[in-house]
Image (cartoon, rainbow, N blue to C red):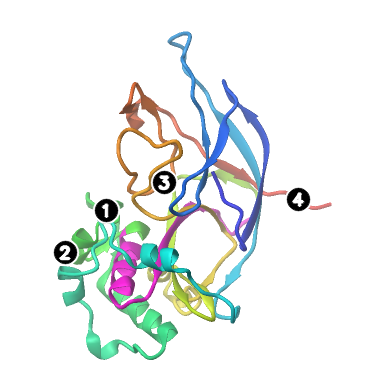
Amino acid sequence: MPQTTAAQQISRLRQAVPVEPKQTTESKYGNRMLHFDLEPSSTDPITFQVTWQITRNEVLGLATVDPAAGLDDAERKIYLAANLKVPIDGKPLTLIDPNQLSRKDPIQLGRSLYEQVDNHMRYDKSKPGFGNGDVLWACDSGFGNCTDFHSLFISWARSQDLPARFEIGFPLPPERGTGKISGYHCWAQFHVDGHGWVPTDISEADKHPDLKSYYFGNLTENRVQFTVGRDITLEPAQDSGPLNYFIYPHVEVDGKTWTTEKTQRAFAFRDKVDG
């Protein structure tokens, strides 16, 4: 489910579901979710539909300074640690140009890594293998989607003792109206003590070079954040092991993952008209 953050405010408007969900929160990242537990009484399809009202704001990460911003020890440990597909040593580090790093200024360090990821990667989904956020694959391929771009950035940032986190949600078109949402979008943020979280959207910068400066430190309002983090254990915990990332509904039947081929997913938006 979408999260309420400094950049967006959410409320559940209505739902058409076969059983009342429980709203739960996983402990590692604080992601909230709706949990449904039921025993089907027939072989008919089971339908779940939830509608949210979301007010989304532009994020101006470089212009917003919070002198009190800091991470506690537990948070710092999480956002400096490796993930299953995001190593912080070995091959990824051999691709960093050390002459371009500014370790005295964390924002300049983040900018250098942002530039180096964009130099190494190109946005390309024409060949299989993209979309898993596998850093070693991104190192070798040099292309991918937003997941691959930002996994590489997070790997490099954490290797330089710069806390970084993965965020995922859905993109919205800049044109107001209604429409379908075809797939997810993700981005990354790095943390600077005394400043706060600074967003980066390197894949959008690669697709729109004229906005490259903007997408370091800023995010448009045309997106909705759903979750933070990788290797996610749901609440209650799923039987199939941690999720690489959590954006689509996760379904288990008799302790086994129900494959996406057996489900139909649809996401849509409608802009609210004031007045």
- The local crowd at label 2, few if under 14, some if 14 to 19, many if 20 or more residues have their Cα within 10 Å, is few
Front residue of 257/206: it is 257
- Residue identified by numbered label 1: 130
Q: Nearer the viewer, mark 4 or mark 3?
A: 3
Front-most of residues 105 and 213 = 105
| Relative image position of residue 215 (x, y in whole percent) | 48, 73
Which amino acid lies under the numbered mark 2 shown in the image of this protein?
Answer: Asp
Q: Which residues are magenta?
A: 148-176
| Element on which disc 4 rests | loop
Q: Amino acid at mark 1?
A: Phe
Mark before the other along the chain sequence, 2 or 4: 2
Residue type highlighted by circle 3: Phe
Residue tagged 3:
246
Queried whether the magenta region covers residue 152, the answer comes back as yes
The residue located at (44%, 50%) in the rendering is 184
Q: Who comes first in sequence, dot 1 or dot 2?
A: 1
User: Label 2, on which residue?
Assistant: 140
Q: Which residue is mark 4?
A: 273
Give the image location of residue 218, x and y in percent: 53, 72
Kindly tell me whether residue 190 is visible in this rendering.
yes
- First-in-chain label (1 vs 3): 1
Find the distance from the CA under tag 2 to the CA under tag 3: 25 Å
Q: Which one is earlier in the sequence, the residue at label 4 or at label 3?
A: 3
Specify whether 38 is left or right of 96.
Answer: right
State the residue at coordinates (40%, 27%). Answer: 263
Q: Nearer the viewer, mark 2 or mark 3?
A: 3
- Residue at mark 1 to residue at mark 3: CA–CA distance: 17 Å
Residue type (three-letter) at the residue carrying disc 4: Val
Q: Residue at x 72, y 49 (%)?
A: 272
